[in-house]
Every structure is written in C-alpha cells, then in structure tokens.
Amino acid sequence: MHRRNTTLLFYVTIIFYNIILHTHIQATFETDLQNGTTQQHKKKYARALTFFEHALYNMPPDKTLRLKLANCFLALGNACFHTQNTDHALHAFNNILRISPNIAAAHHNIAFTLAEKCGQHKQALKHYEQTIKLKPNDAEAHFCYALSLLATGNLYHGFRHYEWRWKRSPDKKPRRHFTYPLEKQLNMQDIKNKRIVLRAEQGLGDTLHFIRYAQILKNMGATIIVEIQKPLVPLLSLCDYIDEIIPIGEKLPPFDYQIPLISLAHILRTTKYTIPQNIPYLRADATIKNYWQQKLAHDITFKIGICWQGSIDHGPLKFMPFHYFAQLAKLPQISVYSLQKKDTNIIDTGDIISFENFDINNGPFMDTAALMQNLDLIITVDTSIAHLAGGLGIPVWVILPFPAEWRWLIGKSHSPWYPTMRLFRQKKVGEWDDVVQEIKYELLKQSRSESKD
C-alpha cells in the first residue's frame, strides 16, 4: 500500500511539474513574442530576431502558437526586406521553415529576396518551385519564377510562366489591363493574309525590345498592325515590316487576331539560341541622319552619346549619378554628347555637348536615333535608349545596377538580344566607382584603337 501511494505521488509530482513547466514555457514564449514585436516596431531588427529565435527554441506544441510565431517571423522578414536588411530578412524567412517546411509564403519570400535583393536567381528557383508545388495556382509565384528562369537564361520556360502576369492581382498586372484571355488571340497555324494587332503593354523600352518579333509574322504573310505608345509612333513608322500604327487610346481597326507584344516570345518558343537576330530592325530617318552628319562633321574625336537617367519611378539607386558621367568628358580625344531629356536638376553639364529642341521639332526619338548613327559609341543606363541603340545595331555600353533586370541575364558582359551591346555591372548597391573606372579604361583603350585606324 505504501509503495502504491509512493508511485502515485511520483506520477502526480511529474504531472504537476510538467504543468508548471508548460505554463512557464508558454509564458516565456509569449513574452519573447511581445518583446520581439516591440523591438521590430522600434526598427531594431537584430534584437527582434533574437527574441523570436528564443521563442522558437521554447516553442510549445500548440499549432495556434506556432502559427503566431511564424507570422511574427514573416512580418519581421518583410520589414527587413523593405529596409534593405537582406540578411536578417532571409534569416527570418528561413526560421519559418523550421516551424513548418510547407509554408508557401516562406518559400516565396526566400526566393524573392534571393532574386531581387541578392541577384541569386539560381538559388531562388528551388524555393519558387516549392511554392508552386504547395500552391499550384499562385499567379505571383509563377510570375516571379518566370523572372528567375529568364535571368538564368531559360527563356523557353521563362516566357511560358511569364504569361501568368495576366492572372496577378489587379495592382500588380502590367500597366495595360487587357482582358484575359484576350479575344481573338493569335493562332500561329493560320496567319497568312491575316490582320494581326500587336499591342504594347509595358514601357517604351519593352516595345523597342520586342517589336523585332513583328518581322517574323510579316515574313509569314501577315498584315502587321501595332498599337503602341504615342512617343514611338514617328520612329516605328520607319519600319517597313509594320503596315499600320495605332497610338494607344485610339480605336483599333478591324483585325483577325491580337496579342500582347511580349507574349510573342512565348508563342514563338524563344530560347537563347532562337532570339530573332535580324538587326538592325529599327531605322533612323535618312534626312535627319544627314543633318546630324553635317553638324558633327568638324568633330574628329571619338564621339560618344550618353544617357545617365531614366524614369524616376525606378528610384535613385538604379542609375549611376551624373558626376560619374561627367568624368568621361574629361578624357582626352573624346567628345561627349547628351542623349538625355532635359533635366532641371542638373544645371551645368560641363563639357558635355547638348542641343536645344532635341527630339522636339522632329518628334520623340527621331533626333536621338539619327544622332546615334553619327556617333562611335553610346553609353547609357538601363533605359529605352539602350534598346534603341541595340535595335539600330549601334555599339552601346549599358550600365546595370545590382541586381540587374532579368533580360540582361546573370553575370554576362554581352547580351544575347543585341550583338553590338556590352554590359557593365554594378557589384554592390550604391557603389559605382568600380563601374566608372572600368568604363574609363575600356573607353580610353577603344578611342586609342580608333585613332590608330
């Protein structure tokens, strides 16, 4: 009887102890969550991460509390992502997978951070694939997966997944909200003598980049109608493979099929080895070209045209500051011409040559294209100027921020889209010294070579 009472007392003690321990762990867990959240609100992300990781160590089995911790890590990771605390963001998202390896949001956020902040698209792919496995109909995951596939050179599968852009949430769709699927979509089996509308959907550079595909359809016997941004109408009117141009906003003429311009890359099953290379596919007006030839006839130096800034919507970190470009004008035997739209923030362009009424009297891009064809080299940040120069078949050096956009691939110094293009890549956000030094070295080398010839 005494032994039985002792055994019972022992088990009661153990149960009581476990209750106290569980209560203490849960209280500690809740305190860690509260402290972590407080530190996060103070933007002390490292300390917040420490509290949340301590909570992870003391994590109770209750599913509700585990989900609460996962959400804390998710909120912290998102805050770190948006404040450029990339390492802490990745740490927070990876901790979610320690709670459960099947949380799609964690895989997606890891992939997106690796791709968009670190330029590590190859490493991002497996997490995007896991996201899609867990949520097969997640349009955002498919779209982001497409960008990483494209960046790694897998254009065939990349453009296939890029079609998911039409199923994204309204605030993330392309700038033009076509109905999906588009009525009368292109049927490649039957286009001879058909009227096909190619519809621009994103920026000016995208239109200049992908208008090359119109040549293929024209060669297959189609009548090509393009609906494009109004600033590109004068320039693309010079393309003999385009039959009719409609500015966006005007009524479309009768047609047999329509297709968003970028979707042609998917429909025509583009790979790195089948990119249309019929370059030049853009033209400059002959009269305007001759005008600039005469105007520059006196200049026997190595002539370069520069563009140092694109749309401010991209933010200040994307573009190399003007003072770096100004250094190029100090180099011997080199003349520097501005291809930049008038920028009121830059009062004095120093030794850089600019012109009044540039691209005004003759229309957008008309002077730019004609002047380019009278220069030896174009140096530009990632804007429509890069695509214009590439499409004209003119030597062009493109300065890319870190990480670069998908179309420029990873770590390449040349572009499969443009044979006359060379890429200069920033290695770290905000640091341009190495880039400009490399450009100056290569520019001096090339100008000396040209002078010897």
Image (tube, rainbow, N blue to C red):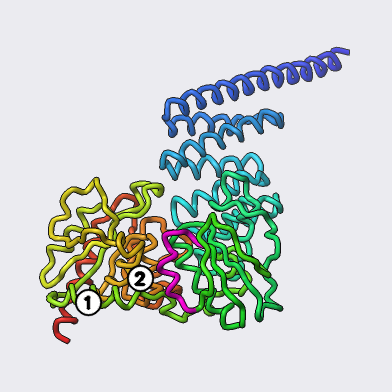
Instruction: Read off the residue under disc 1.
Output: 293
Picture coordinates of residue 101, whole percent (x, y): 65, 46
Left/right placement of residue 359 relative to residue 41 reads left
Residue type indicated by callout 1: Gln
Closer to the camera: disc 2 or disc 1? 1
Residue drawn at x 39%, y 78% is 419
Residue drawn at x 78%, y 16% is 12
Instruction: Read off the residue under disc 2.
Output: 389
Q: Is residue 44 above or below residue 295?
A: above
State whether residue 409 appears in this view: no
Residue type indicated by callout 2: Ala
State whether residue 99 appears in this view: yes
Left/right placement of residue 383 relative to residue 372 reads right
Q: Which residues are magenta?
A: 228-240
Nearest to N terminus: mark 2 or mark 1: 1
Tag 2: Cα neighbours inside 10 Å, few (<14), some, or many (≥20)? many
Q: Is residue 400 magenta?
A: no
Foreground pick, 421 / 116? 421
Q: CA distance from mark 2 to mark 1?
A: 17 Å
The quarter of the rendered structure image containing the N terminus is top right
Q: What kind of element bears circle 1?
A: helix
Residue drawn at x 35%, y 64% is 365
Foreground pick, 258 / 135? 258
